[in-house]
Amino acid sequence: MKNPSATVEKDGPVPGEKPQNSESRQTARKGNRPKRRIPILLTFFISMATWVILSGQFDSFHISLGVVSSFIVAYFSGDLLFAAPVQKNFFRYIIRFLLYLPWLLYQVLIANLHILKLVFHPRMMDRIDPKIIRFNSKLSGQMPLFLFGNSITLTPGTITIFVNIFGTYTVHAIDEKSADGLPGEMENRIVRIFED
């Protein structure tokens, strides 16, 4: 038996709602456009920069393919990359993130050298001591948690296995030295990126 209050006619007005004429619907659609343009433009520029860097081709044919491809990606997925409205401190966060990247790359280099030393050591099997560590982070919010988890995974010797919305991380580390630095300086630097 159907619940009569749950069914709504497709062509008729919704109960409790004022009917809209075509002009007010067009105005409502136009009002959403500027909010949608910023994520599309940001996604376009990110996609285009990635295209140029990865393709390495700078002739007009390849650049035009990049523009078309980047526009299609931006149009259909701009709201996926930037689901929430752009925050007022967005560009400050971007600058702080760009300043964080060299430090992260340096940590990746150090961890690579450590893993290289570990792998070529004559007593490699004695030195490798895999472990699962769990810790609570002081980070909150989706983007800081996401960035911290990916920074851990990018650093050789550690992999983020699980993270929840409360900031509890489960990380696999290949040895004691790789596990010692967590959460540590990396977490503090990410806190500084997102502080107001």
Image (cartoon, rainbow, N blue to C red):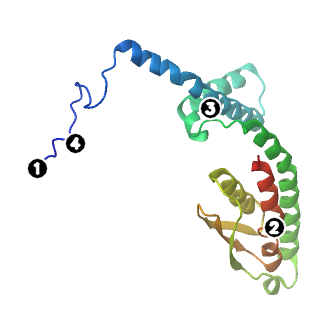
User: Is label 1 in a helix, a strand or a loop?
Assistant: loop
Instruction: Return the residue nearer the eye: 137 or 37.
Output: 137
Alpha carbon separation for disc pair 4 and 3: 35 Å
Alpha carbon separation for disc pair 4 and 2: 53 Å
Residue type, label 2: Gly
Labels 1 & 3 near each other (Cβ < 8 A): no
Q: Residue furthest top?
A: 23
Of mark 4 and mark 2, the one earlier in the sequence is 4
| Residue 191 in the image, given as x and y percentages of width and height | 77, 55
Alpha carbon separation for disc pair 2 and 1: 60 Å
Residue that label 3 marks: 39
Residue that label 2 marks: 184
Closer to viewer: mark 4 or mark 3? 4
On screen, residue 171 versus residue 157, left or right, reads left
Alpha carbon separation for disc pair 3 and 2: 33 Å
Of mark 1 and mark 4, the one earlier in the sequence is 1
Seen at 75% across and 75% down, the residue is 174
Residue type, label 1: Met
Mark 4 is surrounded, within 10 Å at the Cα level, by few (under 14), some (14 to 19) or many (20 or more) other residues, namely few
User: Is label 4 in a helix, a strand or a loop?
Assistant: loop
On screen, residue 22 versus residue 163, left or right, reads left
| Residue 141 in the image, given as x and y percentages of width and height | 64, 53
Residue that label 1 marks: 1
Instruction: Return the residue nearer the eye: 116 or 5.
Output: 5
Seen at 78% across and 49% down, the residue is 193
Residue that label 4 marks: 6
| Residue 95 in the image, given as x and y percentages of width and height | 81, 40
